[in-house]
């Protein structure tokens, strides 16, 4: 096999090209089985050039995690507008999350599956992304509680303080549950192949906003028109 010939292009563009190829290879084969040869071939560059730009397989995998985690987080944050109602903010965030993971299934496979199973520093990168996501969702849930009149901060007397502390714990727990459910649903929706991002978001939104009891009783939350 002859040497791979590459066209001259800006380093930043070439590096993104390598990362794109790495996402696909890591998603398909996992970290251990993925080879720098395969990544270089898919990117259309030489293996020495991959090492020159990204140092090592470990550094390349870390770069993939950081890029894809940042893109997912940015997509969710950009979709949520503070001037909208509480239910609409939560819907917008969920829809953005499932839309992004559906459009980038390989990236989600790397983040949700492979990065968590190879120890440090990869697991720490994903844990940092998840912590940021949980913190953001916690803010959304707390804002929804305030909008609906449920206490989640402050307090004047011992009774209020106890009630507020419980509310804060519930807010944190709800945020953790929502993020965990969203992660699992994204993996399920991508593997199912016939479920749209909007359908997946509506499923979780109804459970989160209406509750199972409400759904069984025939009540549901309707998303805005596309």
Image (cartoon, rainbow, N blue to C red):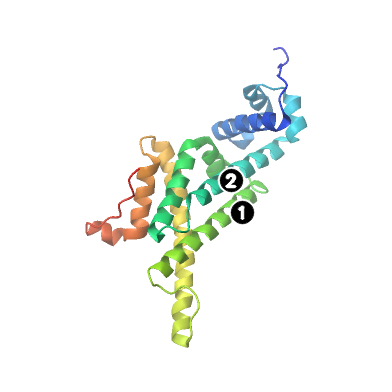
Q: Secondary structure at mark 1?
A: helix
* Residue at the far left in the pictured view: 218
Tell me which residue sits at (52%, 41%) in the image.
108
Query: Mark 1 near mark 2, Cβ–Cβ under 8 Å?
Result: yes
Q: Secondary structure at mark 2?
A: helix
Q: Measuring from the top left, give residue 152's x and y in whole percent.
A: 46, 72
Q: Measuring from the top left, give residue 68's x and y in whole percent.
A: 59, 42
On screen, residue 44 above or below 168: above
On screen, residue 125 above or below 2: below
- Where on the picture, by quarter, is residue 9? top right
On residue 26, the disc is none
Crowding around mark 1 (Cα neighbors within 10 Å: few <14, some 14 to 19, many 20+) is: few
Query: Between residues 166 and 220, which one lies in front from this camera angle?
Result: 220
Tell me which residue sits at (24%, 58%) in the image.
219
Tell me which residue sits at (44%, 68%) in the image.
170
Indicate left or right for 185 with 69 as reference.
Answer: left
- Where on the picture, by quarter, is residue 35? top right
On screen, residue 160 above or below 136: below
Q: Is residue 34 visible?
A: no
Q: Which residue is mark 1?
A: 128
Q: Measuring from the top left, give residue 10's x and y in whole percent.
A: 72, 28
Q: Earlier in the sequence, mark 1 or mark 2?
A: 2
Indicate left or right for 18 with 138 as reference.
Answer: right
* Residue at the far front in the pictured view: 83
Tell me which residue sits at (70%, 33%) in the image.
12
Q: CA distance from mark 1 to mark 2?
A: 9 Å
Crowding around mark 2 (Cα neighbors within 10 Å: few <14, some 14 to 19, many 20+) is: many
Query: Between residues 12 and 207, which one lies in front from this camera angle?
Result: 12
Q: In the picture, which quadrant includes the C terminus?
A: top left
Q: Which residue is mark 2?
A: 69
């Amino acid at each position: 096999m002859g040497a791979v010939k590459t066209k001259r292009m800006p380093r930043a563009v070439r590096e993104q090209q390598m990362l794109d190829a790495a996402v696909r290879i890591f998603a398909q084969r996992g970290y251990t089985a993925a080879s720098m040869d395969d990544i270089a071939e898919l990117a259309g560059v030489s293996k020495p050039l991959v090492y020159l730009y990204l140092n090592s397989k470990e550094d390349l995998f870390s770069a993939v995690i950081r890029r894809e985690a940042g893109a997912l987080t940015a997509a969710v944050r950009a979709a949520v507008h503070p001037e909208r109602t509480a239910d609409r903010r939560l819907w917008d965030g969920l829809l953005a999350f499932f839309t992004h993971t559906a459009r980038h299934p390989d990236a989600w496979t790397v983040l949700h599956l492979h990065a968590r199973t190879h120890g440090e520093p990869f697991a720490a990168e994903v844990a940092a992304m998840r912590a940021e996501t949980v913190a953001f969702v916690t803010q959304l849930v707390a804002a929804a509680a305030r909008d609906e009149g449920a206490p989640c901060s402050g307090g004047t007397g011992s009774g209020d303080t106890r009630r507020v502390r419980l509310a804060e714990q519930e807010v944190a727990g709800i945020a953790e549950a929502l993020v965990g459910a969203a992660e699992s649903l994204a993996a399920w929706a991508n593997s199912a192949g016939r479920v749209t991002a909007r359908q997946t978001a509506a499923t979780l939104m109804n459970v989160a906003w209406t509750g199972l009891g409400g759904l069984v009783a025939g009540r549901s939350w309707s998303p805005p028109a596309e």
